[in-house]
Image: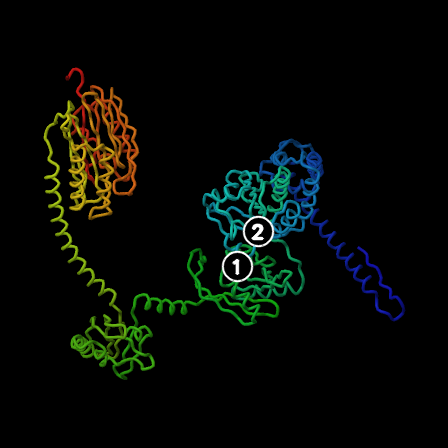
Amino acid sequence: MTSEPVTPAQPGAAPDLVELAKIVARQRAELDRLRDQAATAAVVERAKGAVMALTGCLADAAGELLLQRAKAARRTVLEECWITLGTLAPTPPATGRAGESPGVEAGDCGAAALEQSDAPDDVTAALARLGQALVRVMTPHDLARCLLEHLGPDMGADAVLIYARRPDGGLGLIGHAGVDGRLAAQWCQVPPLSGMAALDALRAGEPRWLEDFASDERRYLLIGDPPDRWRSRAWLPVPAAGSAEVCIGVLRGRGGVFTPRDRAHLRGVTGLCAGRLRAFDTPPARDADAATDAVQALFEALPVAAMLLTPLRTATGETEDFRVQAATAQVGDLLGRTGEEPAGRRLLELRPALAAEPLWQGCLQVLATGKAYEGEPFAHEEVVAGVAELSVYTARVAPLGDALVVSWIRHGSSDRQEQRLADLQRLGNLGWANWNLATQEASWSSQVFSLVGRDPAHGPVRLPEVPELALPEDTPALTRAIGELVHAGRALDVPFRIRTSGGIRHLRLVAEAVADRHGTPVEVHGFVQDMTARRRAELALVESERAILTQHDVLQAERTLASRLQHALLPMSNRPVHLAGLRVEVAYLPAQSGVHVGGDWFSAIELPDGDALLVVGDVAGHGVDAVATMAQLRFTAKGMVITGSSLTGALARLNTLLLHSRDSHATATMVLARYEPRRRRLVWAQAGHPPPLLLRDGEARYLRRPGGMLLGATATPVYQEAECRLDPGDRLILYTDGLVEHPPDSIDLGLEQLAEAVAAPHGDASLGPLLARMLPDERRDDVCVVDVRVPGVQDG
């Protein structure tokens, strides 16, 4: 690098400022070129070293291999170095002799996977420019800004996010550009949830192209406030030897697809970024100078956690981040980056979530006002002598010229003990009190003044005057206990009541005396505790127990009444009955748990025209109301069908009846079936009830349900009929849901078990064994079953 002398235009005249500026610009450009050249050489040497370590070849052979790969894939050598650094797997060295050209190793496979020989020329040129620009990238945030500058003009990218996988399976935001600090803080930590496109891309190892906002919004949880700020997105896992650990998101404000060219371009970008990201394992070295070293040495000597920050401002002058110029060793632990060197790095790079914490606002406040800031105490877990313990810190920020000094003050044990004592008194609703019997002096904690409703300005009350605080009814007992404490040294534990502006308060005084060497009490210390909440809870518990006993008696009487009413309404036959040529067996089993009787019922009668009417139903709820509704529906249904109503007409009228009953919220389910013996035809309709089960020739199947809504659910229901023919030997079972519903198992499992039980070889037995097999030991609901059998030919 050379410099040119500046010659004045004439003797005594000042140099030409324009020419001077040009010289400075050329020198700066030359300096930048040399820095880029040095950084590029470092990347190439690192890539050659990686190839040498993995293949066992010499430096020249490693360089030649990189060159061959670059030519084959139409890449620059620098691009090939970035890809090699990102994709080489930690495999053992090659067994060939040193200097030999190695075969295809893991790195070759990774390079082959990123082959771009078919990419358009403009994409190849763009990737070459990006590869050169990456040598100036020093942090993940720099990488995000570099990518946005590269992809913005090319494909309309408006934001770039870089996420890294955390140990818990979630994601952490390590770099971003094009988003504000508030949104970055909101999405800085992503838990391992389904529905996150970035996580989905990492798990699958394939890009996720979000090009239809409407469908993408239904499938994924989209980043943005609002999410439609970016109408199309691409999430690309950064290729790695093992599972991908970093995902790059490219967000565009415009909608539309990513063209094949765009996709090839983005895949090439992630291939280059892999190597750059791997180089972030250690923080970049800072430019050393005497002043910086002196400041760092000063901070290292400080006995507290502290750091020196300088603001990083945008073009408009707003503070977007801070640079850590110097820091003590403890700062890394407090920022959650134990073992890392904070100096020289951006503050939000060290802790992205800091943008949403009070300390960040405190730093901005100090910059704006010049006044120091002190935050609230907070607990921090640290390891002391190999044991994890919680310590309490307070963060402080003070101005220092254009910079800020942030320090964390660790509270000593005495401070913590004082704070714990105050917390104990506050949480326990108690306060301590001391009385000196010789000087008659008294001292109370602030909590005692609050408990007794006394102004601290009036001072504490002397011990003999304490009974005057209590209600008149409690004064004698308190006076007597204090007298025995003072004269005989007998400890006291006395409840008493006082009247405050908030009403009556129940307090408890516990105290003991300290005697001199002669046994004479000279001092009393103890505590006053607020027992108001406990006393009120005790009184409420007593009232609750009384109410429970009363309610239990009422419920028991109601259960007895409902049970008697139910038995009167549902006469049970001990043997099968014959209706219209059918053999019908019925069963009703009440619930074994709870205090209420349910509303399950059945009907099996022969109609005047010789047909048979078969009904099962279930009223929602329990108790007398459910039994009364059951009786109303049971007798009304039979009456309607006997007087000529169709099955669907009867259900529609029963629905209207429920809607206009005294309990307008009652609902019920039902199956109505009519059997014509001459045609062996069964016509049936249902209202929200499980379908009948038909057993024929050893195979059990459920009849297909016709349309029908729950009774009492709507004023405009629709009911339909279905029919089937019953052949000799058929068996039809109508039932309520208590037979097949056994929580926590699903009702579908219960239906399968019923079909298997009926179709089993012993399924032809009577109804009793079937119920014993199906029902658990503890029934939570009533069960009604109507078992209908068509006699076989041999039975006829």
Query: Which is more N-terminal, label 2 or label 1?
Result: 2
Q: Is residue 618 visible?
A: yes
- Disc count in the image? 2
The reply to whether the C-beta atoms of the residues labelled 1 and 2 are less than 8 Å apart is: no
Quarter containing the N terminus: bottom right
Q: Report the front residue among 560 and 746.
A: 560
Residue 355's disc number: 1
Q: Is residue 509 visible?
A: no
| Element marked by disc 2 | strand
Residue 252, x across and y down, in percent: 59, 47
Which residue does the image show at 21% across and 73% down from the upper left?
Answer: 497
Q: Which of the 4 image quarters holds residue 131?
A: top right
Q: Residues within 10 Å of mark 2 (few under 14, many from 20)?
A: many
Determine which residue is flagged by label 2: 175
Residue 610, x across and y down, in percent: 15, 25
Q: Residues within 10 Å of mark 1 (few under 14, many from 20)?
A: many
Residue 529, x across and y down, in percent: 26, 69
Direction from residue 95 to residue 497 in the image, left or right: left
Direction from residue 65 to residue 700 in the image, left or right: left
